[in-house]
Amino acid sequence: MTALADVPLALAIPIAALVVLGSTLTLIGATGVLRLQSFYDRLHAPTLATSWGTGAIIIASALLFTFIDGRAVVHEFVIGAFIVLTTPVTLMMLGRAALERDRAEGGKAMPEMPEPDPSPDHGPDRGPDRGPNHGRSET
Amino acid sequence: MDALYYGAPAVLLTTSISLALYPATQPGIRLWWAVLYVPHLLLRGFLGGLDVARRVLDPRLPVRPGWRRVPLLTNIAEVNAVLGGVVSVLPGSLAAGIRNGALEVHMLDTEDFNLRSLQAEERRVLRLFGMPVVTPRYAGENRGRS
């Protein structure tokens, strides 16, 4: 607690503001999970917490411990990078699984999406010399 | 110094697993371009987050969720996987996979769907991988409903 008491006001204010901002965004994200209706809608809400909700708290933590330790403390950013990288993958997997389930069951929840216009041109390709994954288009 | 006893094997093991799962011969991103791209992504994420927060806090809950298809410029799996991640990390849009050459995107508000914006994002991802950027194959957007 002694170290915290030594934090100057000019640094304490932005740190506190960032913590409040991050926790507020996280709370709003949680509120969104409650208020939004369908499974797909609810997948959008956690991105609030995992983007700038986490980011603001991480910046606040890095600032505080850099001051207290007297050296650059940046490993929080690694935690943030992992969260930012893994969350969209998780959400995509959840969304894709739900979409496949809805399509397989063919129920009312199945989204309707017209197919795009067919076109022979498919942009830059791997080419024949780019290994066994040539033509793989599914993520 | 003691940290090296743990850190060095961990680095070697992690590097080996990474190379086994994703060999160096596979397409890779350009680091300097990633350094330029991340701030752009953070800004868009922040602005998108504010918009989602506004909608969630509004008592009327002004959302018009639905699906949109974004025709893809390339069929390179790595590029499309990163594009899906970029779309999903932005609040208000969620990529759920690729079907018949198009990215299936769930929008929290379909009125905000901007095909050109997403195609611009795809071109940025292509540049991230050092791939040639081509013009969009489709002029219009394909609409669906939830």
Image: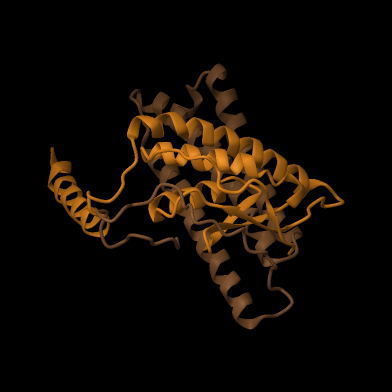
Frontmost residue, B39 versus B9: B39
Residue B28 in the image: state x and y as whole percent: 31, 44
Decide: is B141 above or below A24. below
In the image, taking residue A107 as reference, residue B103 lies left or right, namely left
Residue displayed at 48% across by 46% down: A84
The chain assigned the colour brown in the figure is A
In the image, taking residue A126 as reference, residue A15 lies left or right, namely right
Decide: is A11 above or below B140. above
In the image, taking residue A33 as reference, residue B76 lies left or right, namely left
The chain assigned the colour orange in the figure is B
Residue A79 in the image: state x and y as whole percent: 41, 44
In the image, taking residue B109 as reference, residue A100 lies left or right, namely left
Kindly indicate the quadrant of the structure image that contains residue A74. top left
Decide: is A17 above or below A10. below
Kindly indicate the quadrant of the structure image that contains residue A19. top right
Residue A4 in the image: state x and y as whole percent: 48, 28
Frontmost residue, B84 versus A17: B84
Frontmost residue, A121 versus B82: A121
Residue displayed at 69% across by 68% down: A111
**Quadrant that contains the C terminus of chain A:** bottom left
Query: Which residue is situated farthest in the bottom direction here?
Result: A105
Residue B95 in the image: state x and y as whole percent: 56, 56
Frontmost residue, B117 versus B10: B117
Colour setting:
by chain
